[in-house]
Image (cartoon, rainbow, N blue to C red):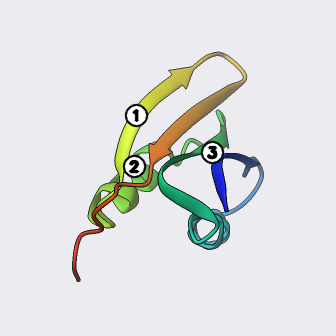
Amino acid sequence: MEMFKTIDIRGHSFFSALQLASEEFTRIKKNGILELIVDKKRDITDALSRWAKNQGYKISDIEDDHRMVRLFIRKSSIKKKS
């Protein structure tokens, strides 16, 4: 299991990006971080941030520049119950 993982989801639809992020979170250790690289033109950062918070994860940072958005999501040690 990994502590830090980066996936580039530029060009993916929201649902495809969400599926990739969900799959990668199963491989991340508790308190590990998943970095999502999001296409600036198709900015789905807000939707992914809401999804992460609803799952009980924490947004640790968002870096925004003219080419892309980097979203860092920390996998909490205690996952929110559904």
Mark 1 lies on residue: 60
Q: Label 2 neighbourhood size at 10 Å, few (<14), some (14-19), many (20+)?
A: some
Mark 2 or 3 closer to N-term? Answer: 3
Coordinates of residue 77 in the picture (x, y in percent): 34, 58
Residue for point 23% across, 83% down: 82
Q: Nearer the viewer, mark 3 or mark 1?
A: 1
Of residue 20 and residue 10, the one placed in the foreground of this image is 20
Amino acid residing under circle 3: Leu
Q: Residue furthest left?
A: 81
Of residue 39 and residue 80, the one placed in the foreground of this image is 80
Residue for point 58% across, 72% down: 26
Q: Nearer the viewer, mark 1 or mark 2?
A: 1
Task: Tell whether 73 sits left or right of 81.
Answer: right
Coordinates of residue 40 in the picture (x, y in percent): 64, 33
Cβ–Cβ under 8 Å for marks 2 and 3: no
Q: Quadrant of residue 25?
A: bottom right
Amino acid residing under circle 2: Ser
Task: Tell whether 31 sits left or right of 10.
Answer: left
Mark 3 lies on residue: 36
Coordinates of residue 48 in the picture (x, y in percent): 46, 54
State how far apart marks 2 and 3 are (Cα). Answer: 10 Å
Q: Quadrant of residue 76?
A: bottom left
Secondary structure type for disc 2: helix
The disc placed on residue 34 is none
Residue for point 38% across, 62% down: 51
Secondary structure type for disc 1: strand
Q: Tell me: residue 1, above or below residue 49.
A: below
Q: Residue furthest top?
A: 65
Mark 2 lies on residue: 49
Q: Tell me: residue 44, above or below residue 61.
A: below
